[in-house]
Amino acid sequence: MFRVIVSKAAQRDLVNIRNYIRDELCNPDAAGRIIRELRTAVQDLRSFPNRGRPLDTMISIHTEYRYLPCENYCIFYLASENEVFIIRILHQKQDTLKALFIDLD
């Protein structure tokens, strides 16, 4: 079983996703359902860390990042020998490269 670590940026992503769906789209039920799905997918990586695809399949730059689609979002992570580090959770229409490699705060 792998240890899952969720970055502060990914934690913020989850809060922002929930708030956007709940408040901007006025759909608290969908917000709760999607957050539960995302959290379940993250926790499933404890048992299946290679479940996601290599990011290389999405971009033409070699990287060790992997991603796991869930709902309309992608969970971006790195897997080591015994840990899975969740980097970001982004909407599929977001600028992934910018969010992963430029917006590093």
Image (cartoon, helix red, strand yellow):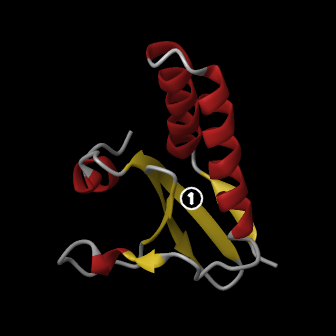
Where is residue 79 drawn, in percent x and y? Answer: 57, 76
Where is residue 68 drawn, in percent x and y? Answer: 50, 67
Q: Amino acid at mark 1?
A: Ile
Tell me if 44 is positioned left or right of 75 in this view: right
Image point (58%, 83%), residue name: 50
Q: Residue furthest left?
A: 60
Location of residue 9 with respect to 42 vertically, above or below:
above
Circle 1 Cα neighbour tier, 10 Å, few/some/many (<14 / 14–19 / ≥20): many
Image point (66%, 85%), residue name: 81
Image point (66%, 60%), residue name: 41
Front residue (pair 91, 15): 91
Image point (50%, 42%), residue name: 9
Which quarter of the figure is the N terminus placed in?
Answer: bottom right
Location of residue 72 with respect to 63 vertically, above or below:
above
Secondary structure of the residue carrying tag 1 is strand
Where is residue 88 drawn, in percent x and y? Answer: 47, 51
Location of residue 68 with respect to 72 vertically, above or below:
below
Q: What residue is pinned by disc 1?
A: 86
Query: Which of the 4 image quadrants contains residue 44?
Result: bottom right
Front residue (pair 102, 43): 43
Query: Which of the 4 image quadrants contains residue 33?
Result: top right
Tell me if 85 is positioned left or right of 92 in this view: right
Front residue (pair 95, 61): 95
Front residue (pair 80, 89): 89
